[in-house]
Structures are given as C-alpha cells and as structure tokens.
Amino acid sequence: MAPKRILVIAGSDSSGGAGLEADQKVIAAHGCYAMTATTALTAQNTLGVQDIHHTPPDFVRKQIDAVCEDVGVDVVKTGMLASAETIMVAADALKRHEINTSIIDPVMVSTSGSQLLPETAIETLIRHLLPHTTLLTPNLPEARLLLQTAGFDLPDPKNVDDIVSMAQHVRSLGPKWVLLKGGHLPLTHGRVVSTHDSEKEVVLNVLVGDTGVTMLESPYLQSRNTHGTGCSLASAIACNLAKGMSMAKAVKKANLYVEAGIKTAVDMGGGSGPINHFHSMYMLPFTPGNFISYLLDREDVQKPWKEYTQHEFVQSMGAGTLPVEKFMYYLVQDYLFLVQFARANALSAYKSSNLKDIGYSVQQVVTLQEEIKLHIDFCKEYGLSEVDIIEEEEDQATTAYTRYVLDIGMSQDYLALQIALLPCLIGYGIIAKRLYEDPSTVRVGSKYWKWIEQYVAEEYREAMMRGSELVEKHAEGLSPSRVEELAKIFIHATNVSARLKMTVGPHANVV
C-alpha cells in the first residue's frame, strides 16, 4: 500500500534536532513519505540559533507547487514560516491545491529563546492561515503571543481551567482544532501551575475542537533533550491523521511518541539536545533477502562456519588424499543422517502454517528420497550394500546433530526448524561449489569428484534455493531478540555438523 504523503513547509535546522530534519525523521519513523518546501536555512546547534537565511517566498511557492502537482499531498504540516510573505504563500497553496488537512505549528520562538517569526507576521498568520487550519499546535508562550496580537488580554494561567480557557480563545481565531501544549508550564499533583522546580509533576496538553475538550496528561520529565519536540509532535500528528485516525487518537499517540523520544534520548551537544525519533523502530541488521548472508558474516558464526566448511576432511577430499575408509564411514553416517533429515522436513510440513510452506517441506522430503537412492547406489561403488548401511550404528555426532534438529522442530516454531536445518542445506552446496571451482581440486582419478559433482548439480542447487528463499521470506518480520535466538540455533547446528566430520575415521567396522 502506498505510504501517506506529508508535505512539510518549514525551516531547516543545521543541527538536525528540529525543523525539516526532525520532521523527516518523524515521518519516516511513522512509515509515511516526507516532502519538503524549505522556508529558511538556519545556522544553529543545541545552544541556539546563530543566523537565519530566508528563502524567497516565490521560490517556496514553486517548491510547494512542484510537489503538489506531481506526487500529491495528503496532509500539510508547517513549521517556521519565517515571514508574512511566506505565510501568505502557504495559505494560498492550501486553497489552490485543495488540501483539506493541515497541521500548523506556529513556530515563533525556539526552545533556546530565539525569535523565529517577526511580530509583524503574526497578524498575517491569524488573518490568512488560521481560518484554513485543521489543527493549530501552539505552546503556551506562542498562544499568549497570538492572543495578544488578536487583542485578547488574558491573565497568565494558574490552573487547568485557565489553560482550557486559553485554548478555547485561540480556537476562536479560526482553526478547527487547537492543541495547547503545556510543556512550558508544568503543573503540580493538585493540577495548579507549579512555582518551584520541586513541584513540577504533570505536563498538560489541552485539545479543543468540535467534540469538546480532551486533556492529555503525562509525567513531567526532567530532561535537557527537548529540542524539536514541537516539530516532532506536529509531524507525528500529521502522520496519524493521514492514516485515518480521529483527532483525539492522533494526538494521544503522538504525545506518547514524543514522551518516549524524550525518555530514550541520548545527550548530544552542550545545550538542549534532540529527542530519539526512532525509539520504536527496529532496523533489521540485514536488508530484505539477505538474512543468510547476515548470519554467515556474523563474527560469532564465522569461526564455527569455517571449521565446518573448511575442515581437514573437506580439504583432503579436494586434494584426493582422504583415506578411503574415512570416506566410507562418512557415507554410512551421511545415509543415516539423511533419513533423520527427511524426518525433520516431514516435521516441518506439520509445523507449517500455510499450504505453500507445507508444499515446500513435502518437496524437500521427495528430494531427499531421491538423494538417498542415489546415495545407496554411490555406496555400492565402494562395496557397501544397503544392508551394511542400514545396520550400521549411528555415530554419536550424527545423533547429536539430528536429534538437536528434531528437538528444535518439536519445541520451537517453523522458522527455527528451518534455521537448524540450514547449515547442512547450504553447507554441502557451498563446500562442493568451492571444491568444484578450485583449480587445485583433483578431478581425474579422484574417488571423490563424483560426490562433489552431486552437490553442485542443478537439482541440489534448486533445493538449496528453495530452502534459502523460504528462510528469507520468514526472516523479514523478525524482532531483535528473535534474530539473536535464531543466530544461536544456527551456530549450535553448525558446531554439531562440524563434529560429524571430526569423528569420521578408520575405526568404522564397515571397512
């Protein structure tokens, strides 16, 4: 489904914590698509704004038109509009492009106290933009400036009723909804304005609109990482509204998002640092379709994987120097292993949750049946009959790996079983491919070349591809903890697979 399109008309923050940079992070974190019309460039950091370079209003209009006429816009969110002329451009664009949902964050003063909107532009904002505003999100100082400009002379709020009254007066200026943010005026437990730091307990945001008054309380957080909270809150609301949420729900979820961003922020800079915009997002440590590559590249996997795929047994096969009795013992154990491997794939069909996965598991069992037949014929070339093979006792290493796989299949989910099977599924193919392509591998006269050819053949490569694609498909929705759990399963399965090679030797009674 196409992501919702959010156009942000605002200024840029060179420190990345507020403005367009923060807006784009928030919008990305909410799974929406961010577009921008830059109203100004700022030279700023966590300590304050050093300078502002204004974008010509006509160029702001061109940015807005370019986006609206091509990509399209679901919601407009504004931040620092910088001048009366740019405010007029934004108001005109909302009408011309028939944009029905707009979130106006009346950025007038930065967190550090810098003036970001000339006082002469505030009247333009009230007269031309607020009547076309879906939601206005002023903090208390901004609300006071708006009301003073409009001619209201309200006393400083002392309690909840005063704050609600202020929000309702701001709404009378034209916007359909007003969210009055109370972060600048924390309340006590008794819901009156605090007068000392020790009394700051509650932050109250008041939403007023068609459905009445909604009060949103959150605990006061003593933190210096609040740079860009207003930008972030408004952008989060814009995304939630674009997704079809009611106003009250959109605001509540956005409040929680910002609250968590403050709680999980890491100190940056020497002043008011940014919030953590990606607190609720987990970026998989691999790109889609590359989970197996990620596993093989992990530091904790590389050592056991090398021991497994580059074991002396394997290297001796390529060189043609492996004692034949060791290879014969391996063939017998490999047959016994393949039988248990088929059981595990049959169990995988039972554990499957859809017909496609069931079909894959069944196909793997059929492939293994054919492989076992070929294996028996191959063993005959070494004087090993089917009876000899079947009656041979499983080596402890064979039992350790196959029963581990079956135990994972019984105790865990479908994907865990596939991961336990994975070292052998891809390991044989990777080993054979390396030996096949190595010019030093003995071909003519080698007793082991036929085995190598068997595992680079198209049928086995197709089985590897089917299994790998299945794992990749199921890996796309993993959580961080599950990735680690599956990696541990893969490592253990690789270790016990390596032991299969370590134990083969001339002690076998089939020789």
Image (spheres, helix red, strand yellow):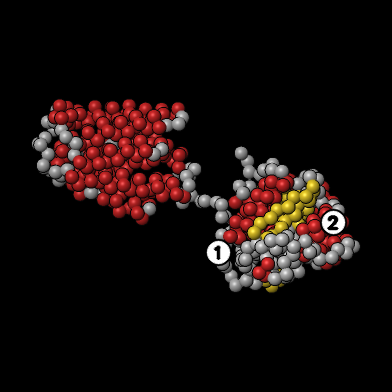
Residue 141 at what x, y percent from top left?
77, 65
Q: Is residue 411 left or right of residue 36?
A: left
Tell me: residue 134, above or below residue 395.
Answer: below
Closer to the chain start, of discs 1 and 2, is: 2
Q: Residue at x 45, y 39 (%)?
A: 474
Q: Taking 66 as reference, is 454 left or right?
A: left
User: Which picture quadrant has residue 471?
Assistant: top left
Q: Position of residue 138 (x, y in %)?
A: 76, 59
Q: Secondary structure at mark 1?
A: loop
Q: Residue flagged by tag 1: what amino acid is it?
A: Val
Question: Residue at 79% of width from left, 45% of height from top?
Answer: 211
Q: Which mark is residue 147?
A: none
User: What residue is disc 2 on?
Assistant: 169
Q: Residues within 10 Å of mark 2 (few under 14, many from 20)?
A: some
Quadrant of the image for the N terminus? top right
Looking at the image, can residue 78 be seen?
no
User: What is the residue that sits farthest to the front in this orientation?
Assistant: 190
